[in-house]
Image: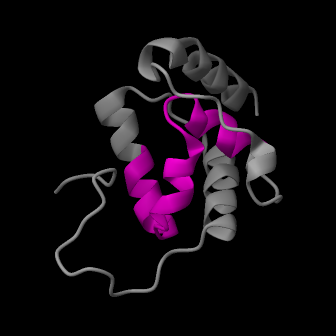
Amino acid sequence: MIRLALALGAALAAAPVLAQGVAPSDPADYPDAPGREEAVAFCGACHSFRIVAQQRLTRAQWDESMKWMVQRHNMPELDKEDMDLILGYIEKAFPAAPAGGRPGWRTPFAPQR
């Protein structure tokens, strides 16, 4: 939990530079479940949490996206406990979209292969 606090602090310190003009997300706007405040604060440090809520990715896709953000955008790396808390919230509150969707379309926020 201490690592999450340090990571949140680092993310929030960088937020004015990274999230120019992004209004802070209010946790109360999203479903109540364990990890809500941590997920909204951590993800919302760089972009609106609405982007996260709209993605509807699987847990595996979120895990891949988080690793990509660490490597590509210098996002603070979370320890396993904090990552599980945040991904658990996202997975429960915003379940993955059913398979199918628009053929050939890929979210621009997912890691590119």
Indicate whether residue 110 is drawn in magenta. no
Rendered location of residue 24, percent (x, y): 64, 30
In the rendered image of this protein, does residue 48 appear above or below residue 20? below
Indicate whether residue 48 is drawn in magenta. yes
Q: What quarter of the picture does the N terminus occupy? A: top right
- Seen from the viewer's position, the closer of residues 68 and 81 is 68
Structure colour scheme = one colour
Magenta-tinted stretch: 37-66
In the rendered image of this protein, does residue 33 appear above or below residue 4? below
- Seen from the viewer's position, the closer of residues 24 and 2 is 24
Q: What quarter of the picture does the C terminus occupy? A: bottom left
- What residue is shown at x 38% (from left), y 26% (from top)? 74
Magenta region, mostly helix, strand or loop? Answer: helix
Rendered location of residue 59, percent (x, y): 51, 66
Rendered location of residue 81, percent (x, y): 69, 47
Identify the image quadrant of residue 60. Answer: bottom left
Relative to 43, is 36 on the left or the right? right
- What residue is shown at x 72% (from left), y 40% (from top)? 38
Relative to 15, is 100 on the left or the right? left
Rendered location of residue 101, percent (x, y): 33, 82
In the rendered image of this protein, does residue 68 appear above or below residue 92? above
Q: How many marks?
A: 0
- What residue is shown at x 66% (from left), y 37% (from top)? 25
- Seen from the viewer's position, the closer of residues 53 and 79 is 53
- What residue is shown at x 39% (from left), y 51% (from top)? 65
Identify the image quadrant of residue 89. Answer: bottom right
